[in-house]
């Protein structure tokens, strides 16, 4: 079942900028889906439709097969199902301390104090920010803010978690920790949707990939499907994962026998190389 879906969604900003055109996007239950696209392609605009922050100029957004309606009560309900971590944590964090910020959502839906405290502690622990409870969010570094913003959504236990560039601004260890966490949440049953430019990470984590360019979805499929279309990837100002690019060079320039589909991860490349050397 698709738990999140857009049907022919168009969106034009009030100043007339056309940001989305006929976007059909879906995320099946329990999957991890990546939206890839260059700057200004429409990733954040699309994500803001998923819990009703933006309303399509035309087309429909469906959550668990029900079209969104935009009255206050329905929107409140949908926001408990679909949690969105904004691209810029400054758009999200507002409370005087980290713990109050993370507690805000759970308190707002009426959970009791003990449960709220448990969720705050667990969420901060999971993003690696335990120990920062009393700090004001504006005294944190960019990467730390990002992690607290993720904890704030995690504390709501949404069924679907949408993260707009969750690894941007994080150091390699921080990025890998967040991706491991998302992978784990996904294995526990949460549907995860992320946007990113980081093509190297996509094949490691995502089972379904969409490419958006100038407000249009121009490609969708498994990482293998999507990255075997180098032309579309490059036309969208993206690139192949480094490993696939190396294999492409070895095949095309050095005439080594690496046929397409190229391996996309270190693990796949290692297998392929060992096999070549064995023969
Ligand atoms: N509030 C706004 N008013 C008018 N135009 C906007 C507004 N926000 C975004 N846009 C325009 O809409 C288009 C899509 O922007 P969006 O922020 O969705 O891109 P993005 O794919 O998230 O880019 P990035 O990778 O830089 O985050 C761009 O052309 C942008 O200039
Ligand atoms: Mg964006």
Image (tube, helix red, strand yellow):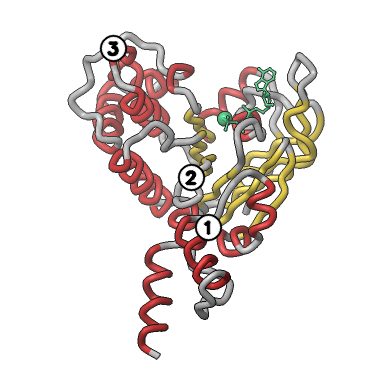
Q: Residue furthest bottom?
A: 279
Residue at point 28% right, 38% down?
A: 126
Determine which quarter of the picture holds residue 152: top left
Left or right side of 129 for 55: right
Q: Position of residue 159 (x, y in %)?
A: 49, 41
In front here: 102 or 244?
A: 244
**Circle 1 sits on which residue?**
207
Q: In the current view of this chain or complex, which residue is farthest to the front?
A: 253
Q: Is mark 1 on a helix, strand or loop?
A: loop
Q: Which of marks 2 and 1 is nearer the N terminus?
A: 2
What mark, if any, has residue 136 been given in the picture? 3
- Mark 2 to mark 3 CA distance (whole Å): 30 Å
Question: Which residue does the image show at 29% across and 18% down from the upper left?
Answer: 140
Tell me if the residue at label 2 has its CB under 8 Å from ligand 1.
Answer: no
- Nearest the eye: 251 or 237: 251
Mark number, residue 227:
none
Q: In which quarter of the image is residue 271?
A: bottom left
Distance (Cα) linking label 3 and label 1: 37 Å
| Residue farthest along the top direction in this orientation | 96
x%, y% of residue 249?
Answer: 52, 65
Is residue 116 visible in this depiction of the protein?
yes
Residues under labels 2 and 1: Cα distance?
A: 15 Å
Residue 30: x and y, percent? 50, 52
For the C terminus, give its image quadrant.
Answer: bottom left
Q: At 40% from the left edge and 12% from the top edge, which residue is drawn?
A: 94
Height in image: 268 above or below 100? below
Say which quadrant the N terminus sits in.
bottom right
Q: At numbered mark 2, what does the secondary structure look like: helix, strand or loop?
A: loop
Q: Is residue 78 visible?
A: no
Mark 3 residue element: loop
Label 2 sits on residue: 198
- Along the polypeptide, which appears first: circle 3 or circle 1? 3
């Amino acid at each position: 079942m698709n738990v999140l879906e857009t049907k022919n969604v168009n969106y034009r900003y009030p100043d007339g900028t056309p940001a989305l055109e006929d976007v059909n996007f879906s995320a099946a239950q329990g999957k991890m889906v990546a939206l890839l696209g260059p700057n200004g392609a429409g990733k954040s605009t699309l994500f803001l439709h998923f819990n009703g922050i933006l309303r399509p100029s035309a087309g429909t957004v469906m959550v668990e097969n029900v079209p969104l309606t935009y009255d206050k009560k329905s929107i409140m309900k949908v926001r408990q199902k679909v949690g969105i971590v904004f691209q810029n944590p400054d758009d999200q964090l507002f409370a005087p301390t980290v713990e109050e910020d993370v507690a805000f959502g759970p308190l707002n839906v009426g959970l009791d104090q003990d449960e709220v405290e448990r969720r705050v502690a667990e969420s901060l622990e999971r993003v690696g920010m335990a120990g920062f409870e009393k700090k004001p969010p504006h005294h944190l570094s960019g990467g730390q803010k990002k992690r607290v913003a993720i904890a704030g959504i995690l504390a709501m236990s949404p069924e679907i978690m949408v993260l707009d560039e969750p690894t941007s601004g994080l150091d390699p260890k921080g990025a890998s920790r967040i991706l491991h966490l998302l992978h784990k949440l996904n294995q526990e049953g949460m549907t995860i949707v992320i946007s990113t430019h980081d093509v190297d990470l996509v094949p490691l984590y995502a089972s379904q990939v969409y490419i958006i360019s100038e407000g249009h979805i121009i490609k969708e499929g498994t990482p293998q499907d999507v990255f075997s279309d180098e032309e579309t990837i490059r036309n969208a100002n993206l690139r192949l994962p480094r490993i696939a690019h190396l294999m492409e060079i070895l095949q095309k320039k050095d005439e080594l026998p690496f046929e397409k589909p190229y391996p996309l991860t270190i693990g796949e490349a290692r297998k392929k190389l060992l096999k070549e050397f064995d023969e």
